[in-house]
Amino acid sequence: MTAAEHAVPIKPTLSWRSFGPHRRTPVRSVLDAGNRLEVTSGRIAIAIALQNLGVQPGDEVLVPAYHCGAMVEPIVALGATPVFYRISPATTVDLDHISARLSSATKALIVTHYFGFPQPMQSVLAFATEHKLGLIEDCAHMFFGSVAELAPGAHGDYAIASAMKFFPVYDGGYLISRKHPIDDSKVRSAGVLFDIKSLFASIEYGASHKRLWPVSSILRLAFAAKDRLWTTFKRAYPAVSEQPLGPSSSDGGASFDSRWIDIGMSRPSRLLIKLADTSRIVDARRSNFLLMLRLLEKAPRLTPVFRELPPNVVPHVFPILLDDPRSIPELRAAGVPLLHFGEQLWPNMDEGICPVSVDYSRRLVQLPCHQDLSAQDITRIADRAVEALSSLRQS
Ligand SMILES: *Cc1c(COP(=O)(O)O)cnc(C)c1O
């Protein structure tokens, strides 16, 4: 058995419970916001949004100082310059600082709903309109919920979303717009090999976490056989097998590969999203978040970033601020599944621009609260975290 089989899955995991009716949920999703284009990742959607807004080499794009590489890479790939702006400790955008960062070359503004908690979009939209900026709403963490009574993504010229963060899929991103038509004539399929890769990746991840019981053991044997075949194939046909079957965005990489710009989402991903039980996703994420909050509210050496869960929020993760960033490896060693959004800030993002972002980059980590974790899983994660932090030597 591998370590992964004992580990709690860090992201949504395919299981029999993934499927169910698309029941009406009290909250909306980004797919309700408007027209859409289905691509392979959120970062590809950002690139197309920038292109559609007419961003040219030499233009400036305002992007939050607290970010991941996938938000900045598309800007740089188009030859434009990222200009970083401040966020508050509550992760809300600082409009005064954005104002101070404007120049005659500023073309667009990207605003991120961190961890599923909405930004004040009415004032952001008023600002963008006043300064004639294209507005991109980054809903990578906010697939479900609502923002000022509208679906996530409805305020921006364009919105982007990432399917992998909310569904048990290998690839998937959306470009969405309530305000502009979306041209899908250039989008083509990557072909049947990509579809197979996508389907296998979802099943394999589910099986490795024993979520596809009772067929998991059979599937694991099948995948071991597949891996051996694949290794043999790669030795026999090195040229063919050097071509990656999927984008690096699907393997946790932060890089941007423009070859995937006009490629549509794989068919298995589309189908899994269509068949997903959305109300289960919404309910489970909210109740897991609330349980985690109850268990960690008074825990020593960490502070939950959000101590309330408003009714319009369907969280992506449970963010915690650690007293000491040196406890991150200790938590990992204790088997606590940790995400670390914003760990790598863009190299020229200097500390003076936004001390909060630099601090958060070091100390803010995220625990999973997705729909495929049970109350027992959440309790186990919280217990392990508390134990690991309390066993640290007082420094
Ligand atoms: C993950 C992420 C993206 C990019 O999404 P991918 O689907 O991984 O390309 C964009 N913005 C934020 C805030 C993200 O966390």
Image (tube, rainbow, N blue to C red):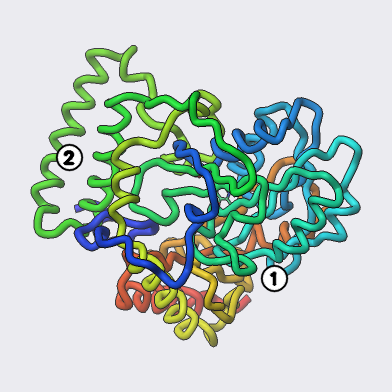
In the image, what residue occupies the spot 46% across and 80% down?
A: 290
Considering only vertical position in the picture, is 266 above or below 386?
Answer: above
In the image, what residue occupies the spot 74% across and 47% down?
A: 109
Q: From the viewer's perspective, is 107 left or right of 238?
A: right
Q: Which residue is mark 2?
A: 223
Q: Position of residue 205 (x, y in %)?
A: 28, 49
Crowding at dot 1, Cα within 10 Å, few <14 / some 14-19 / many 20+, comes out as few
Q: Give the image quarter of residue 120.
A: bottom right
Q: From the viewer's perspective, is 291 left or right of 232?
A: right
Q: Give the image quarter of residue 132.
A: top right
Mark 1 and mark 2 in contact? Answer it, CB < 8 Å. no
Considering only vertical position in the picture, is 270 above or below 226?
Answer: below
Q: Nearer the viewer, residue 3 or 321?
A: 321
In the image, what residue occupies the spot 27% across and 54% down?
A: 14
Query: Label 1's element?
Result: loop
In the image, what residue occupies the spot 50% across and 43% down?
A: 36
Q: Which residue is mark 1?
A: 90
Q: Nearer the viewer, residue 22 or 284?
A: 22
Q: Position of residue 74 (x, y in %)?
A: 63, 35
Q: How many marks?
A: 2
Q: Nearer the viewer, residue 162 or 212?
A: 162
Query: Label 2's element?
Result: helix
Which of discs 1 and 2 lies nearer the camera? The answer is 1
Which mark, by number, is residue 276?
Answer: none
Q: Position of residue 48 (x, y in %)?
A: 60, 34
* Cα distance between the residues tagged 1 and 2: 44 Å
Asked if the residue at label 1 sits under 8 Å from ligand 1, the reply is no
